[in-house]
Amino acid sequence: MKTDRRARFFIAIVLFLASFIFDAIPAKAQPTITQQPTNTSVLLGGTANLSVTATGTPPISFLWQFEGTNTTNSGQSLSIPIVHRADLGTYDVIISDQTGSVTSDVVHLTLAGPRPIITLVTNTPLYNVISLQYTVAPNVEFQLLVAHDMTAPVEWFGPAQISLSGDATNDNWSFDDATNYTEFYPETYWMLDAYP
């Protein structure tokens, strides 16, 4: 009986001391996001900037993701100097430190303003005229994509600087010795994008 009492007393002492020890050790926490990235809209060919602010136990690392796939961007800010259509979509950032990791909100990068309206005006084996109505970023060169459908082989025309302002503009874009797309019309897909 005495042995059992001594064992229980010893266990009680150990648990009592352990509670003091664990209380004295500060609890480790994952990084804390103090400012989430936000949804962003930008003109085609414009500059997009996303950023996040976080605190944690140094060193703190950042890994941006696009559509759930890791990118090469590893800073608090993600900058896209010239936005292409392929850049549009969802972004988030994984923030890590010695205690763990946390993922930011998912945000969307979208086009500001109306999408370009592209109309085939003249179509001959040697000469094409494309009518454009667009709202794009200023002082950026653009190119025009043509395809039977978006999964078929495509061809780019250009580049050409088609806008010196961000205002909606009507313009005609001519291509000498262009391929004859009569067999595609009216099922041809035309797409405007920044260059390169």
Image: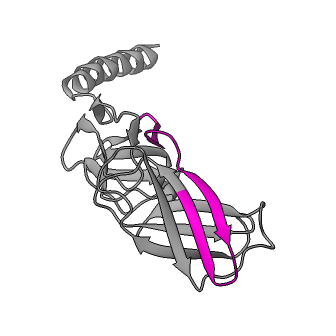
Camera-side residue: 155 or 163? 163
Q: Find the residue positioned furthest to the right.
A: 183
142 is within the stretch colored magenta: no
Q: Quadrant of the C terminus?
A: bottom left
Which quadrant of the structure image shows residue 120?
A: bottom right
Residue 13 at x, y = what percent? 29, 18
Q: Quadrant of residue 25?
A: top left
**Residue 161 can be seen, yes or no:** yes
Query: In this orientation, which residue lies closer to the viewer: 21 or 114?
Result: 114
Q: Position of residue 178 (x, y in %)?
A: 61, 82
Residue in the image at 34% along x and 20% along y: 15
Tally the marks. 0
194 or 168: nearer the eye? 168
Q: Residue at x 33, y 44 (%)?
A: 95
- The residue shown at (53%, 45%) is 115
- Please provide percent x and percent y for residue 119: 62, 56
Q: Position of residue 92 (x, y in %)?
A: 43, 43
The residue nearer to you, when weighing 57 against 158, is 158
- Residues drawn in magenta: 103-131
Q: Residue at x 50, y 62 (%)?
A: 172
User: Is residue 153 placed above or below 135 in the rendered structure?
Assistant: below
Can see residue 28?
no
Q: Is residue 122 above or below residue 153?
A: above
Q: Main secondary structure of the magenta part?
A: strand
